[in-house]
């Protein structure tokens, strides 16, 4: 029996409706908020993002516009993201940076991308280049150029502070202090990013042997950083580092141990510097084996934090020498040399071996 | 050195502790196990079983071995079963636990314990049927152990180590054969006891049939013992052929007599397998085909195995493609059997047959084939089976030609499997990378259990590659950050083991920090998982550390916290005994006696606990504890008891390691001395020599006895004990005996005897021995020609001069000295001997000049040698002999004063003593002096 014309019309209406609903879902943006105290997972807001800036995201959800601070957002999923982007994300996660770069490049050429999605794709492309530079130093210039171009093209983009931070990490490995300062200055000009800029500046000051200035700057930045935010953890890490630089080892050790105890055991960004700082304190206190154990945490568990990992490897190399185990020192040095051939820590570790 | 906890940490070192996590044991055990179980089974039928038996079997089936143990203990307490039944259940429980134990060392221990207990239990069972049921299980247990030893032998790095295990395996097969023969005899007697005919409606019929079936199974078992032992001999060796032929003939007869029975068909299957291994492939294939075509559902398992054996036959006749297809078909048809012994065997066959086809394959086919083969070999490698060693060898070969996949590109399960595979192949660098990649993947998806598992394996891997600090970091991280995970206690144990090894390996600097970390980790482990086996390991570690630190009460507190049911109880008690003994030595009066008595109790607890668990008396741990006990008894004045304990240890030490045997001998001598039975010690040595003990072992025993006698004499002399004279006489007799024995046939032995005689103030006897040394060695051209003997010759000659001088044989001393002077005029001992000889010859002025000259000569040396100080004392002696005691005294005092603070303590003491002695000597009157 053939269906009646009315029934056929009904099927068509349902089919079109479902198709549109699917399309609508595909275009829906999603904000995952950070969990607040007592929550195991953060709130999810679905709607359409109308605008983004380094400080806030405006999203239209349920007929009204909601504005949320970027610091409170854990992740953003845009609707209408091209498949090449998703594939590139997976490649990047697996450490296949050249394939990821290629995927992001293909995604950026997709027709009909919304401007905020295009911006996101460009940022991830530049970030993938920076990650690739970690493996292949020849790509550093290309990465710097892409990041600078991103910052120039989207001065009010949500990802600009993150892009500047990645850029800073790249230029820090070079020998141009003015360039480094200029990147930090650029970040400081972004509304809402002063706190982050001050932290980076403080970190730089410690590296330049000015821990007192760094501590002062951290005190200034205290009011610019939201309580319980990841930046607060970063600030504490830099404070520990400054105290180590100032040789206030007891205070630094206590802060480091507090930070380690309070932090999620998988948070490499917070724990790698904390364990390194703890290692520095213990080493200064004449406890080479305790220090070794601290640095080994960074080496074994938190090697994703590449800068800190290089630092830990250099310290481990030196400590094996102190413990009169030259073969183990050589092993650690080889690992440092093969993983971070351009790291200043490599030069330091090599230098200390020649003394 | 800190303890390595014997077995437990040895397991870690051999990665067995790591294996248990991920590997399921093949549920049906060995090939043989399946065959033996394919009959009726050993226990009485359910209707006949008591409720208690059924309950215990239920616990075993579910893997609740500890609960089964508790229940058996409860039954014993309530007297609900007779003692023989309790003893049997206890023995059987250890066996059931062993069959499900993937940790191979633990499996072996359990099997050994179970077999020892079974033997004792069966002897007490009065009912013949029950005893036969028990024997069926006993045979299975012994074969299982033999099989385990064979599997272990396949993984040994050297032929020597392999052969040792193969020998042990064959010995166990012989034991199984013996028990099976006893069983067969008993079953035969029982079968004959039935008055025939036993018709189908006869009430005796079930019992009769059961007895017949048991006999049939025992006969099948006898043939399969031969087959299994054949596997332990090299291919085509006469022993292998003989055993296979014997098994084949028995099986053929069994099949012919029992065609209608499952056991008869089983016999047919194994007959074919024997034929196949004897090279008769066509006949074997025919039998397999015949069995596979059987439609009876009761023969399903048998058909499956026949298909597996036929695959091997296909490979043997080079039908690799067909064999590979059959493997795939087998695995597809029986997916639930993939991890059984047969399933693992089929997977290995699949890999082998794929690899055998590769030489003719295209590059693409080759790559795909290698990938599949590698996956299959990896799967074989991860499960305990007889096929593991072969899979390891093949995989190692394959890895040389095919590149490893980047672990970052694998998913979690694949990365973990790749890590395990690499670890099995001892490629720790790759294994670590794989586990690290797996852990990172699990961390990204926040799968905590998976993360902990991957990191745990990484910790094991680091431990096995001797990266102890790194292993500690990971183990400790897991234990502290994820305490509720089931693997965390194991991780804590790794951290403990790693830190113990690190402490022992990196002692040269900052050792205290390692020790503190060890204490902290052990305390944390004991506190966090107080009821776990790991907590007990931690307690034993803590006890050992506290003992080393002299914190005896703390050590006793932690060691006594190890409960009686713990696996570590015996070790904890043994260590507690050592702690208490040291405590007693640090105290005096009644407190010391109490501690010593408590030490004895602890040692006895340890020994009885181990024996009760079925640990054989010749286990080195028991022997060591017995010796510790004997030591304490001997030193506490209970020599007679010590002699008894040493005798027990000695009777069990026949196969003990040499160092343990040596300790037995030392203690025996000491306890014989303490009980005035020195002649017995010497007689023992004479008997050993008569019994053909080789010269090296004999020398070693003589030297130990000599050392023990010297020590004993020193302590008796210091204590003013009247036994000194008797012991010294025995010592002199001993030296004579040594010189005359086979052990005394070397330069070292004779020189040792001669010097010992000299030290014991027997210069004449010593000189006699030196004369013998001269004749037998020093004058021999071959001895002189070896440059390595130059120093030996000098030493013998110098000591000859001393012996001759002391024995009053001054011309001989002078001649020998001249000989020495021509060869080595500047050798200090020669110069010293010259001075002494001048003195002995009464040439006091010459002697004085000699010593004066020597002191002047040596004064310039930095630091001054001992001879410098000795020369001053000798000079004082000469002065004394010249009647110038005051001058002698003043001279020594002057030298002492001028030496200031740099004067060596021991020489200061000697000078002081000499000055005191000279002061006590009456000063000759001035006239006399003049």
Image (cartoon, grey):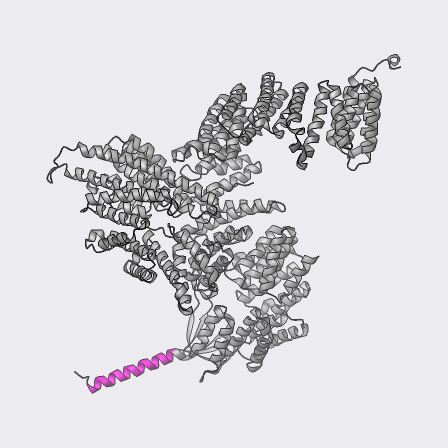
Measured from the top left, where is residue A203 in percent x and y?
A: 63, 66
Asked whether residue B54 is in view, the answer is: no
Q: Nearer the viewer, residue B281 or B500?
A: B281
Q: Residue at x 44, y 41 (%)?
A: B164
Measured from the top left, where is residue B339 in percent x and y?
A: 34, 54
Name above or below for residue B543 compared with residue B698: below
Q: Quadrant of residue B567?
A: top left
Span highlighted in magenta in the image: A4-25
Residue A13 belongs to magenta span: yes
Give the quadrant of the N terminus of chain B. Answer: top right
Asked whether residue B790 is in view, the answer is: yes
- On screen, residue B460 versus residue A191, left or right, reads left
Q: Quadrant of residue B901?
A: top right
Q: Main secondary structure of the magenta part?
A: helix
Name above or below for residue B132 compared with residue B399: above
Q: Residue at x 56, y 61 (%)?
A: A272
């Amino acid at each position: 029996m053939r269906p009646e014309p009315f029934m056929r019309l009904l099927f068509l209406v349902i089919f079109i409706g479902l198709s549109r609903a699917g399309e609508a879902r595909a275009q829906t943006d999603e904000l995952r908020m950070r969990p607040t105290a007592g929550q195991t997972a953060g709130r999810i807001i679905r709607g359409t993002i109308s605008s983004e800036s380094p400080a806030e995201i405006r999203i239209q959800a349920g007929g009204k516009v909601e504005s949320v601070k970027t610091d409170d957002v854990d992740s953003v999923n845009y609707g209408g993201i091209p498949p090449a982007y998703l594939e590139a994300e997976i490649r990047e996660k697996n450490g296949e940076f050249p394939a990821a770069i290629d995927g992001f490049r293909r995604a950026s050429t997709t027709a009909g991308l919304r401007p905020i999605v295009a911006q996101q794709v460009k940022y991830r492309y530049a970030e993938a280049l920076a990650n690739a530079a970690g493996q292949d130093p020849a790509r550093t210039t290309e990465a710097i150029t892409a990041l600078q171009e991103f910052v120039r093209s989207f001065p009010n983009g949500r990802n600009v502070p993150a892009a500047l931070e990645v850029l800073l990490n790249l230029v820090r490995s070079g020998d141009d202090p003015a360039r480094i300062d200029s990147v930090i200055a650029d970040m400081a000009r972004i509304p809402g990013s002063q706190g982050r800029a001050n932290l980076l500046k403080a970190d730089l000051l410690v590296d330049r042997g000015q821990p007192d200035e760094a501590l002062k700057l951290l005190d200034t930045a205290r009011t610019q950083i939201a309580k319980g935010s990841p930046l607060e953890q970063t600030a504490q890490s830099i404070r520990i580092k400054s105290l180590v630089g100032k040789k206030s080892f007891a205070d630094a050790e206590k802060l480091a141990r507090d930070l380690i105890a309070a932090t999620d055991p998988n948070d490499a960004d917070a724990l790698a510097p904390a364990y390194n700082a703890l290692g520095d304190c213990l080493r200064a206190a004449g406890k080479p084996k305790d220090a070794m154990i601290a640095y080994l945490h960074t080496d074994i568990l938190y090697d994703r934090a590449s800068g800190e990992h290089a630092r830990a490897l250099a310290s481990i190399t030196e400590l094996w020498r102190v413990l009169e185990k030259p073969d183990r020192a050589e092993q650690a040095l080889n690992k440092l040399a093969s993983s971070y051939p351009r790291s200043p820590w490599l030069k330091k570790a090599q230098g200390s071996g020649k003394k | 050195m800190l303890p390595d906890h014997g077995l437990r940490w040895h397991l870690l070192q051999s990665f067995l502790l790591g294996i248990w996590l991920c590997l399921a044991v093949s549920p049906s055990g060995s090939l043989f196990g399946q065959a033996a179980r394919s009959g009726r089974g050993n226990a009485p039928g359910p209707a006949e079983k008591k409720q208690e038996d059924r309950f215990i079997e239920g616990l075993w089936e579910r893997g609740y071995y500890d609960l089964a143990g508790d229940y058996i203990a409860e039954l014993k307490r309530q007297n609900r079963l007779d003692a023989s039944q309790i003893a049997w259940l206890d023995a059987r429980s250890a066996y059931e636990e062993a069959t499900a134990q993937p940790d191979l060392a633990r499996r072996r221990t359990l099997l050994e314990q179970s077999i020892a207990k079974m033997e004792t239990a069966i002897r007490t069972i009065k009912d013949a049927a029950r005893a036969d049921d028990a024997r069926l299980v006993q045979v299975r247990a012994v074969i299982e152990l033999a099989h385990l030893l064979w599997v272990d032998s396949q993984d040994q790095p050297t032929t020597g180590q392999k052969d040792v295990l193969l020998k042990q395996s064959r010995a166990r097969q012989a034991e199984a054969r013996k028990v099976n023969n006893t069983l067969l005899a008993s079953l035969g007697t029982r079968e004959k006891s039935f008055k025939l005919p036993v018709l189908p409606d006869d009430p005796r019929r079930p019992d009769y049939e059961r007895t017949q079936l048991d006999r049939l199974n025992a006969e099948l078992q006898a043939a399969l013992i031969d087959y299994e032992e054949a596997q332990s001999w090299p291919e085509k060796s006469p022993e292998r052929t003989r055993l296979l032929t014997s098994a084949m003939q028995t099986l053929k007869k069994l099949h012919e007599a029992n065609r209608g029975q499952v056991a008869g068909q089983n016999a047919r299957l194994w007959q074919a397998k024997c034929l196949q291994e004897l090279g008769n492939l066509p006949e074997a294939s025919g039998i397999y085909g015949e069995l596979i075509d059987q439609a009876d559902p009761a023969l399903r398992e048998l058909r499956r195995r026949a298909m597996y054996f036929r695959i091997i036959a296909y490979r043997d006749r080079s039908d690799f493609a067909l064999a590979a297809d059959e493997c795939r078909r087998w695995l597809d048809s029986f997916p639930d059997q993939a991890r059984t012994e047969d399933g693992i065997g089929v997977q290995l066959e699949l890999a082998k047959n794929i690899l055998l086809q590769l030489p003719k394959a295209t590059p693409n086919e080759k790559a795909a084939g290698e990938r599949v083969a590698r996956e299959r070999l990896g799967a074989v490698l991860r499960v305990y089976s007889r096929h593991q060693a072969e899979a390891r060898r093949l995989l190692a070969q394959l890895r040389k030609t095919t590149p490893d996949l980047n672990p970052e590109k694998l998913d979690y399960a694949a990365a973990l499997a790749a890590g395990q595979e690499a670890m099995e192949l001892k490629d720790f660098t790759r294994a670590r990378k794989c586990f690290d990649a797996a852990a990172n993947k699990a961390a990204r998806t926040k799968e905590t259990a998976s993360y902990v598992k991957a990191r745990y394996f990484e910790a094991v891997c680091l431990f096995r590659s001797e990266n102890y600090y790194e292993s500690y970091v990971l183990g400790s991280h897991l234990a502290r950050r994820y305490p509720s995970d089931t693997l965390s206690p194991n991780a804590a144990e790794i951290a403990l083991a790693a830190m113990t090894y690190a402490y022992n390996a990196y002692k040269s600097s900052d050792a205290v920090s390692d020790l503190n970390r060890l204490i902290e980790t052990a305390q944390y482990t004991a506190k966090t998982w107080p009821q776990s086996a790991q907590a007990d390991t931690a307690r034993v570690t803590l006890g050992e550390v506290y003992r080393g630190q002299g914190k005896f009460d703390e050590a006793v507190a932690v060691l006594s916290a190890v409960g009686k049911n713990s696996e570590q109880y015996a070790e904890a008690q043994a260590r507690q005994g050592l702690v208490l003994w040291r405590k007693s030595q640090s105290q005096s009066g009644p407190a010391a006696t109490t501690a010593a008595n408590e030490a004895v109790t602890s040692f006895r607890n340890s020994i009885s606990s181990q024996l009760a668990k079925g640990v054989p008396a010749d286990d080195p741990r028991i022997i060591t504890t017995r010796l510790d006990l004997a030591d304490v008894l001997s030193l506490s004045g209970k020599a007679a008891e010590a002699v008894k304990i040493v005798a027990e240890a000695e009777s069990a030490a026949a196969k003990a390691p040499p160092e343990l045997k040596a300790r037995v001998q030392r203690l025996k001598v000491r306890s014989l001395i303490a009980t005035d039975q020195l002649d017995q010690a010497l007689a023992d040595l004479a008997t050993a020599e008569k019994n053909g003990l080789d010269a090296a072992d004999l020398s070693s025993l003589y030297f130990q006895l000599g050392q023990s006698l010297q020590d004993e004499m020193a302590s008796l002399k210091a204590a003013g004990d009247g036994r000194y004279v008797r012991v010294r006489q025995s010592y002199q007799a001993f030296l004579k005996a040594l010189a005359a024995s086979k052990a005394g046939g070397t330069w070292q032995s004779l020189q040792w005897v001669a010097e010992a005689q000299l030290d014991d103030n027997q210069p004449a006897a010593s000189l006699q021995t030196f004369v013998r040394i001269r004749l037998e060695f020093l004058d021999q051209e071959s001895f002189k020609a070896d440059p390595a003997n130059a120093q030996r010759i000098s030493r013998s000659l110098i000591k000859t001069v001393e012996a001759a001088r002391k024995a009053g044989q001054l011309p001989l001393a002078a001649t020998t000295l001249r000989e020495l002077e021509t060869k080595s005029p500047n050798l200090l001992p020669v110069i010293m001997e010259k001075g002494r000889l001048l003195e002995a010859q009464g040439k006091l002025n010459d002697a004085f000049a000699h010593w004066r000259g020597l002191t002047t000569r040596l004064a310039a040396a930095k630091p001054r040698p001992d001879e410098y100080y000795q020369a001053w004392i000798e000079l004082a002696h000469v002065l004394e002999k010249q009647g110038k005691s005051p001058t002698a005294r003043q001279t020594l005092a002057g030298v002492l004063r001028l030496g200031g603070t740099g004067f060596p303590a021991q020489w200061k003491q000697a000078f002081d003593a000499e000055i005191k002695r000279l002061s006590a000597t009456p000063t000759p009157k001035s006239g006399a002096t003049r």
